[in-house]
Amino acid sequence: MKKAITILLAAVMITSAFAGCAGSANSSSETTAPATASAAAETTAPTEATTATLSQTDDAIVDAGLKVDENGKIIDKNGKEVKTEDGKVEVKTEDGKTVKVDADDVKGANDNKKAVSSSNNSSSSKTSASSSKKSSSSTSGNKTSGSSSSSNKSSSSSNKNSSGNKTSSGSTTTKKPSTSSSTKPKTVAVTSVKLSKSSLTITQGKSSSFTVTINPSNASNKSYTAYTSNSNATVSCSGSKVTVTGKKAGSCTITVKASNNKSATCKVTVKAQATSKPTTVTDDTKLTHKQIASESTMKKVTDYINSYFSDLGFVYDTSLNKDNTGWLLAQTKLYPGDYYVSLNQIKKEIAEYFYDTLESVFAVNDEPLGEVVPFSDVRFNCYYEKRADGEYNIFFAY
């Protein structure tokens, strides 16, 4: 009977010692706590009950996905911090028991689990680890540095202390930020905006473009805004390219402005869109400059003017020219542009110009030409000459 009592007391001491491993490594009160009533009730099989409790606690920690981050905080499998109470967090074992564990227990459980996995003998490793814990702790009932679990916890504490987050005793310290990493990068301001073109000439409905250069090349903010002064043209930006599209005949200014209001401008001229060339040309058809400055148009103009003055009573004389008499001059370069005037407009304008100029030559007291000098007393000849530049001179000799 005495021998039986001695064995029972030894079992109680072992159970009491290992019940403290599930608590905080820094709490001496938990490691020296007396055995509970439930622990005493299990004294009939002390070794098996104690081993099962420790193994299940480790499994519960690993199954819950609990880990210790670099700051010593307990996190779940999703990396979120788990709320603790007095530095502990509760986990449930497979048999429904609730066990409070701290960071050191979480670290130890994960280390033990890794060791078991690497040996490919899960069940025997758990039993060996449990036996090792019981053997190393049975003499004093406290956690010692000689146990596998305690050894893992010491390593964890030492690692935390070296990182500046926790000391070996588990107290929290403040990690000072690195001076180099907290230094803000220097801001480089824009000094100028350059455009590849200072002016553009485009036809209505057509587009042209220029490129934008923001200086210096290492400016912190190289963004820019392009806008037009009116609706004669629109702008669009793509990277460093600005595209201008003519909308209405006229002019406008395109401004390109950087983030700090440095800017540059481009002057834009929008020409009217040319209408399609008519298939049938009549004397009322508006002509291109190329059509006006042509042999056929000049012959029609001079024939008309000779007929016009002959009908007034002037005497047509083909022997007259600019070298042997007085003369007046009209030129095709006075009609620039595309689809500017018709043949009838040109004939009328030149004929009236010659008559008005001739009247001013013979003017007396502002009297009409026919009264000062009878038309029949005036000889004339209208003819044309082609110039080297492709234009035509129309002479009215009198």
Image (spheres, grey):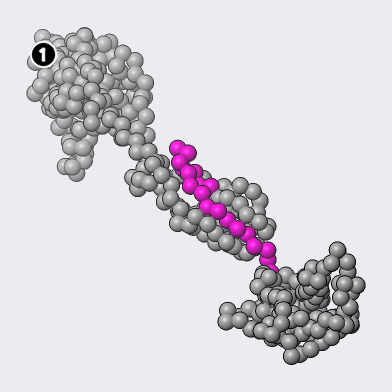
Q: What's the amino acid at mark 1?
A: Ser
Residue 53 placed where, x, y %?
A: 25, 24
Tell me the residue at 45%/56% (across/down).
Answer: 196
Stretch in magenta: 255-275
Tell me the residue at 15%/11% (across/down).
Answer: 9
Whether residue 213 sits left or right of residue 332 in the image: it is left
Foreground residue among 20 and 8: 20
Foreground residue among 300 and 255: 300
Q: Is residue 122 above or below residue 90?
A: below
**What is the quadrant of residue 28 in the picture?**
top left
Tell me if mark 1 has few (under 14), some (14-19) or many (20+) residues whose alpha carbon lies within 10 angstroms of its own: few
- Is residue 8 in sight in this rendering? no
Q: In this view, does 336 lie above or below 388?
A: above
Residue that carries the numbered disc 1 in the rendered image: 140
Residue 367 placed where, x, y %?
A: 88, 66
- Is residue 267 in sight in this rendering? yes
Residue 155 placed where, x, y %?
A: 14, 27
Tell me the residue at 79%/73% (across/down).
Answer: 358
Q: In which quarter of the image is the N terminus?
A: top left
